[in-house]
Image (tube, helix red, strand yellow):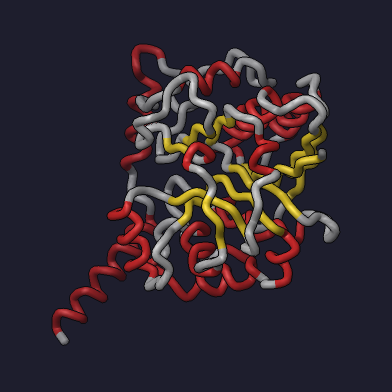
Amino acid sequence: MLIRVVLAVDAKQVIGCAVCMRSILENLRDGASIHFDVMTNALSPRDRQALCETVLNSQRSATIALHDVNLTRFQRLLTSKFMSHMTYARLLIDEILPPETDRCIYVDCDMVVERDIAVAWEFPFEGHTIAATSNGDAEDTRSHLVRLGLEEQRYFNAGFVVMDLVRWRALQVSARAMVHAQAQGDRLVLYDQDALNCALQRDWVELPRDWNAGVNVSEWLTDESEAVFHYWGATKPWHADYAGRFQHVFLRHLDRTAYSGYRPWNPFGLGAFVVRTKRRIPHIPAVFRAIRQLLRITRTNVV
């Protein structure tokens, strides 16, 4: 069994990418093989080498290919201070992977996979294009549906997705998601995830929740859970100011990668202070976005 896993990474996420891949390999069943397709942008030679070493020195049946991607087509799409245009790179999957590839698993770089990913690889699509987990509770889901004007009564989290690439290509999901991303404009809050939910209404089958467990919202999650730990949010376990749950789970795998021993600079809490201060600096595009929304509300009230 050869499992193809796709990730997308820039310099800000590279340590998370290494940890994610290593965790996948450490929990993979005997007899299975992994090929990682890693879409990259502006990675240093040192980081590129570290990612390759993390995989090739794992003593598991694994290979890796790095794909430099051109993000210029996404330049007009919304981003945030914490989310670059690299978030849209998954829309290039059907171009990056060979045309004969019929299935892959996309995984975000802020995940630790503490279970055998081969189980997800074998998950039945039941005639749908992807398999993914629901995102948030009922109230959270309802807010997304209203914001995007969707008729679908569910909303999926795109951090861990099993993809039927035959259907994906046939239905031109990437192109349709791009159209939705542009059409949604300022309503696009969760970026490519919003766009994919628009493009794949009623065309996804639900994975069990343990395939994408937000560490700070999944109260059932424990150190021993066989689950995918998702460190979503602005602060990540490789940041100096991370105060969320299960950092030790992340660090355990980190010390088995080519970044072994890395810890964020934080003498006397200075590193955390610097990071928090930078995080408070306004993101100019976000400021303009807020102004546009305020003007729309004002015009609506006037009318």
Left or right: where 138 falls relative to 70: left
- The residue at 40%/22% (across/down) is 271
Left or right: where 107 falls relative to 166: left
Relative to 26, residue 98 above or below: below
Left or right: where 28 falls relative to 114: right
Left or right: where 164 falls relative to 228: right
Total marks drawn? 0
The location of residue 174, given as percent across then percent down, is 64, 66
- Which image quarter: residue 286? bottom left
Relative to 83, residue 235 above or below: above
> Which residue ends up furthest to the bottom in the rendered image?
303
State which quarter of the image contains the C terminus: bottom left
The location of residue 123, given as percent across then percent down, is 65, 47
- The residue at 83%/60% (across/down) is 99
State which quarter of the image contains the N terminus: top right
Return the residue nearer the eye: 32 or 249: 32
Return the residue nearer the eye: 210 or 185: 210
Q: Is residue 40 visible?
A: no
Q: Is residue 90 visible?
A: yes
The location of residue 267, given as percent across then percent down, is 40, 13
- The residue at 39%/25% (across/down) is 245
> Which residue ends up furthest to the left in the rendered image?
302
- The residue at 23%/69% (across/down) is 294
Return the residue nearer the eye: 171 or 225: 225
Relative to 241, residue 186 above or below: below
